[in-house]
Image (cartoon, rainbow, N blue to C red):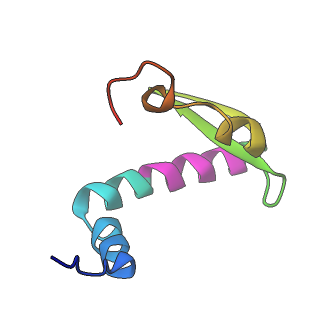
Amino acid sequence: MRLKKRNYKKEYKKFQSSPEQKKERVKRNKNRRRLLKGGLVSKGDGKDIHHKGNKLTVMSASKNRGIAEKSRLKGSKRK
């Protein structure tokens, strides 16, 4: 049996257009604008907004993206 080739472009578009993802994106953009206005971040500064629960912190993009997710850690049941 031959598997059908996946249409990643279609999957991505469908995921990004879902109502839940739109709400999450609105929240992230609103937080970013608030911190831009407050002077904590600026365009092109290499900083990310780290979201941990309801707490927002500013950290370097490389540090933020290097944080290991729990699902990827050794011993995780989720794979």
Report whether residue 2 is seen. yes
The part of the image, by quadrant, that contains residue 12 is bottom left
Is 35 contained in the magenta span? yes
Report x, y in % for residue 28: 50, 50
Query: Magenta-highlighted stretch: main secondary structure?
Result: helix
Q: Residue shown at 71%/50% (left/top)? A: 36
Instruction: Quadrant for the N terminus, please.
Output: bottom left
Image point 49% across, 32% down: which residue? 72
Examine the image and state in which quarter residue 62 appears: top right
- Point out the stretch of residues depicted in magenta: 27-36
Quadrant of the rendering where the C terminus is positioned: top left
Tell me: 26 left or right of 30: left
Q: Residue furthest front?
A: 1
Looking at the image, residue 10 lies above or below residue 35? below
What residue do we see at 32% from left, 24% from top? 77
Outermost residue to the left:
1
Asked if residue 40 shows in the view, the reply is no
Residue 49 point in image, percent of width and height? 64, 41
Q: Considering depth in this image, is 55 or 12 the residue closer to the camera? A: 12
- Residue, far top: 75
Q: Which residue is drawn at 44% across and 26% down?
A: 53
Closer to us: 6 or 28: 6
In front of the other: 3 or 17: 3
Judging depth in this view, the residue of 42 and 20 nearest the camera is: 20
Residue 20 drawn at (x, y percent): 26, 55
Q: Is residue 24 above or below residue 79?
A: below
Q: Residue 38's x, y, as percent?
A: 72, 42
Q: Is residue 11 left or right of residue 30?
A: left
